[in-house]
Image (spheres, grey):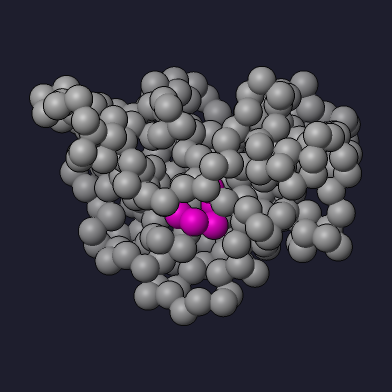
Amino acid sequence: MSPYDTTFGSPGASDDKSSVAAMVETARALGAKPLRNDIVMIFTDGEEPGLLGASSYVAEHANSGQGGGPVLNWEATGNAGPAVLFETSAGNAELIKEFGTAAELPIGDSALAALYQAGNQNTDFMVFKNAGFVGLNFALMDGTAAYHNSVDTAARLDRAGLQHMGPNMLRPTRELADRDLASLRSSDDAVFFTIFRQLITLSELAGLAAGWSGDCDHGGFGCAGATSERSDHSWDTGRGRSSAVADHHGAAGRDRPVAAADHGPAGICDAAYG
């Protein structure tokens, strides 16, 4: 789910047309394989003035929250950086485990989620969460000077941030759509953080400490995604771009324009996002 509206005077390239573009590309990539469950792509309007589109959808599907699938919401509070998991529904343990396993480069922190809940900001995700849906909320969080600003243009949008959002949207969506939806609801909340390019939960870290033998035969570092097959695309904070972008475009990386004709909708490289 992503809102396509923005604030007056802002082109809204990052907030939130970047997420809309990634969702369109995700829909294209998902189309090739039948899945166990239906996937609903929700593009909302009126998010900025009062979460109007999300409220309308929930009102028309009042009973979906109790038995429906998880909601993945995509936002931006800046025009750069990786897509960070910054909010979850209650009882998130199974969702965190699934996201950590499926995502190429999962980035999130439960402390950040707690800080966000203590504030007074809201996104469309709040409407769904209050209606009983389970889910996860993500956002680009760097480059905050562009947030709700006239400089939030496509030319200034960090291509690396868009590239990071893409696979982390596609792969968990694909995996969740093949799961028993009831199994994704839990009575437990996970304490999680990112380290060693993995999403780690506190319970797994405790299990690692208890059973550590020095050879990591059980999967390595107790990571939620330790046993998943990942490509070697990493988020390079030092250079401000993902190596997936750098590898595909050469030394120029994000400084070289991305042509939609070469990479499909949203200008995302199919080699890293498909």
Residue 65 shows in this picture: yes
- Viewer-closest of 119 and 232: 232
Residue 42 or 201: which is nearer the viewer? 201
Q: How many marks?
A: 0
Q: Residue 264, how many percent across, how many down?
A: 77, 63
Specify the principal SS of the magenta part: helix
Q: Looking at the image, which residue is at 28% across and 55% down?
A: 184
In which quadrant will I find the N terminus? bottom right
Reply above or below: 65 against 147: below
- In which quadrant of the rendered view does residue 141 lie? top right
**Range of magenta residues:** 168-172
Q: At 56% across and 69% down in the image, what residue appears? A: 30
* Residue extending farthest front: 215
38 relative position to 156: left or right: left
The residue sitting at 20% across, 25% down in the picture is 214
User: Residue 171 magenta-drawn?
Assistant: yes
Tell me where residue 254 appears, x and y as whole percent: 80, 36
Q: Is residue 128 visible?
A: no
Compare residues 42 and 190 and report the one nearer the observer: 190
Foreground pick, 84 / 152: 84
Q: Position of residue 93 (x, y in %)?
A: 26, 42
With respect to residue 59, does 88 lie above or below? above
| Quadrant of the drawing holding the C terminus | bottom right
Residue at the spot 79% in from the left edge and 40% down from the top edge: 250
Q: Position of residue 95 (x, y in %)?
A: 33, 47
Judge left or right: residue 221 versus residue 43. left
Q: Left of 25 or right of it: where is 149? A: right
* 267 up-or-down from 125: above or below: below
Q: Is residue 252 rendered magenta in the image?
A: no
